[in-house]
Image (cartoon, rainbow, N blue to C red):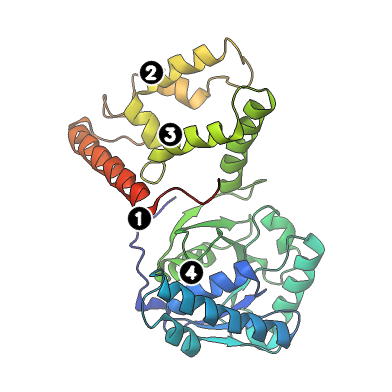
Amino acid sequence: MTTPEATEPTANNAARKIAVVGSGYMGGGIAQVLALGGARVALADVSAEIAQKNYDRLLVESDQFIADGLFPAGSTEILKQNLWAAKDIEEAVADADFIEECVPEVLEIKHQSLARISAAARPDAVIGSNTSTISIAALAEAVTHPERFLGVHFSNPSPFIPGVEIIPHAETSAATVAASRELVHAAGKQTAVVKDVTGFVLNRLQYALFHEAAQLVEQGIATADDVDTLVRTTFGFRLPFFGPFAIADMAGLDVYNFCYKSLQTGFPERFATPKILSDLVEAGKLGTKTGAGFLNVPAERTPELIAYRNKAYVAMQKLIEELGPAPIN
């Protein structure tokens, strides 16, 4: 379930006390986001010295982001007011309403950290993990009152990527999910709630694309540079505005169904037609041209949708030309 809330921070976090455990690149970026959103945020790490060093780094980064026009003027002052380095995990979490665990992606390290957090935090404090790969249920084994625990997965670089995965496990309460989403929205981000399965959603999609791209290069069908060029300038060009289901609805689900059959002549198993697609086609739900598909956009809105799409793509191209090519080659 996604939410289209505005990406400007609100005042809703003003009274919240938050702890971020793990003050490295990801944890530090998340702390910046939450502190700039108005919350009082404690940074904790394996030592007070490391937490303080990363606190100082975040202020320097903020100054540079302001100079580059990436953070608003005054952001560093807000961080100085709202962000602080704790001497240890226990001090950071003692009075926190929400705690985000951002330690390395090693189950043992996460279990140890979550056990310390659970022992020192208030029993009603919500605990989130920024894991991108480890089962939330497996992590919950180290958490007392596991109903207050879930995945809250930011993406790198967290100050600038707007989406956050919210991943409850089987015992997570609805109140915990709601509170976590509200906190993330108040910091100017958008959320999607997904089930606790291997890879969640973000990484299943990301690695599926990379797997196919790597095979194309391995088989000599295209170079890595050519694959990147095609992704950037064709279907990837659409993705800032439309997800895969909106794109399919606009293209026509009957067209997608036909293309799957064509792909199956060379790759019968890898490109088997998804049942959810064939069921819609058989029901005559072909996307925007019939007013029903994956997203059920009414047919009368098609001209408005096409106008938005064309305007968005022209604006994207202008932005790319303004920024110039990425400094890769």
SS state under label 2: helix
The spot of residue 96 in percent (x, y) is 58, 83
Tell which tag, 4 or 2, sits nearer the viewer. Answer: 2
At label 2, counting other C-alpha atoms closer than 10 Å, the crowd grade (few under 14, some 14-19, many 20 or more) is many
Residue projecting furthest to the front: 329
What residue is at 43 percent from the left and 34 percent from the top?
235
Spatial CA distance of label 1 from label 2 is 29 Å
SS state under label 3: helix
What residue is at 50 percent from the left and 18 percent from the top?
260
Q: Is residue 21 left or right of residue 78?
A: right
Looking at numbered disc 1 in the image, what kind of residue is underneath it? Pro
Residue at numbered disc 1: 4
Is residue 294 in view from this perspective? no
The mark that comes first in sequence, 4 or 2, is 4
Residue 254 got which mark? 2
The mark that comes first in sequence, 4 or 3, is 4
